[in-house]
Image (cartoon, grey):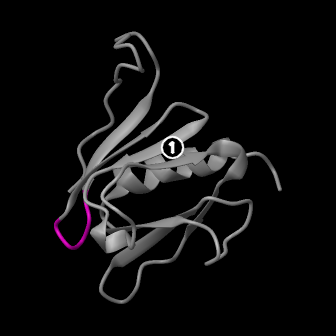
Amino acid sequence: MAAPREPGPAAGGDPTSDVDHIRYSSYFGNEFLATFDGVILEIFGPTAEMGASRETMRFHRDLMTVTMEAPNRKGLLTIEVYAGPSASRSVPSCQVRIREQDRAVIEFFERVRTALPAA
């Protein structure tokens, strides 16, 4: 279940900043924190299920693609973030695996996708 969006401090700890962030659990039960400042998307948390090392995943708005699949018959949804201008398995990527009722998480990634430059 996703925690509601809360304003958070930007780098340097400014509590008045408008960094969008959300804490969520994948459908495997792993906890994550995603932040987006309008330019950089960062995803913190266990990354073993994403096929990457245990480091923060960072994506720049100008070099990022976000895709969202429709929920499957079990209500599971996958959001994929690619470190490139198009969806490709040849660039680093991150899969966000959630349940369709995690509306706050879906809305967070929709806001990120809306902030991307037009193709």
Give residue 36's position: percent from left, percent from top. Answer: 49, 37
Residue 27 belongs to magenta span: yes
Residue 77 belongs to magenta span: no
86 versus 32 height, above or below: below
Dominant secondary structure, magenta:
loop
**Residue drawn 33% across the image and 36% down it:** 5
Q: Give the range drawn in magenta.
A: 25-29
Residue 12 occupies quadrant: top left
Farthest left residue in view: 29
**Residue drawn 67% across the image and 71% down it:** 87
69 versus 59 height, above or below: below
Specify the amino acid type for callout 1: Leu
Give residue 17's position: percent from left, percent from top. Answer: 44, 15
**Residue drawn 34% across the image and 24% down it:** 8
Q: In this view, does 28 lie to the left or right of 10?
A: left
In the picture of the structure, the residue carrying the numbered disc 1 is: 41
Mark 1, other Cα within 10 Å: few <14 / some 14–19 / many ≥20: many
